[in-house]
């Protein structure tokens, strides 16, 4: 059996947070896997090789994804993966700023998962609130001003 043709996306380089990250994306056709009913619609396997340079230190990470995109759409897959992580990072940053989430110490049972869900609901409501101040200030204002709190919660009825 012939080896499937691999598609590669040229290296992308990003700087920030004191280091440089170099990413290379490769895709392979997944026709051998998509023939199985469980994986119907699967078109490619995606591998992302990341190399992060911070000073003299280098860390390497490999991530794998399943995709419905054709293997030739490696550039689109690379952009989609990057956009996904951008959204995740922005959400985490917003939760940390508005709710100081990194300092929460819930460790037992479902407490951490429940609090994370409530924080995300509150974050979405606060983002919709009519205000020109940041999320942290909106959260504080909702705690101090019952009228503003009702405005924020009133948005929940339309969801």
Image: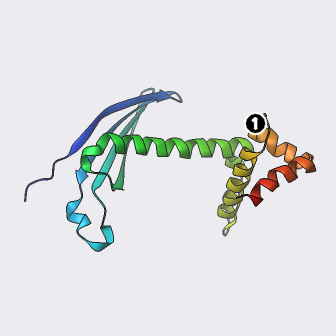
Closer to us: 38 or 158: 158
Q: Is residue 31 above or below residue 64?
A: below
Observer able to see residue 75: yes
Q: Quadrant of the C terminus?
A: bottom right
Task: Report the residue marked by disc 1.
Answer: 134
Residue 126 x, y percent position in the rendering: 75, 47
Residue shown at 80%/42% (left/top)?
138
Task: Tell me: 101 left or right of 53.
Answer: right
**Quarter of the image holding residue 154?**
bottom right
Residue 22 x, y percent position in the rendering: 37, 33
Q: Is residue 31 above or below residue 53?
A: below
Q: Is residue 129 above or below residue 57?
A: below
| Furthest residue in direction bottom, as rendered | 37
Q: Is residue 35 above or below residue 28?
A: below
Residue shown at 33%/56% (left/top)?
68
- Secondary structure under tag 1 reads loop
Closer to us: 143 or 60: 143
Figure coloring: rainbow
């Amino acid at each position: 059996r012939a080896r499937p043709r691999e598609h590669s996306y040229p290296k992308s380089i990003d700087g920030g947070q004191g280091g440089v990250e170099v990413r290379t994306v490769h895709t392979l056709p997944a026709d051998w896997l998509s023939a199985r009913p469980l994986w119907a619609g699967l078109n490619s396997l995606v591998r992302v090789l990341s190399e992060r340079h911070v000073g003299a230190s280098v860390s390497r990470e490999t991530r794998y994804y399943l995709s419905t995109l054709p293997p030739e759409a490696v550039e689109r897959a690379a952009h989609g993966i990057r956009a996904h992580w951008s959204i995740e990072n922005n959400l985490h940053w917003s939760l940390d700023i508005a709710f100081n989430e990194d300092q929460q110490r819930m460790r037992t049972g479902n407490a951490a998962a429940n609090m994370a869900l409530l924080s995300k609901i509150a974050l979405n409501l606060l983002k919709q609130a009519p205000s020109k101040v940041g999320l942290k200030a909106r959260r504080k204002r909702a705690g101090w001003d019952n009228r503003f709190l009702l405005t924020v919660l009133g948005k929940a009825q339309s969801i």
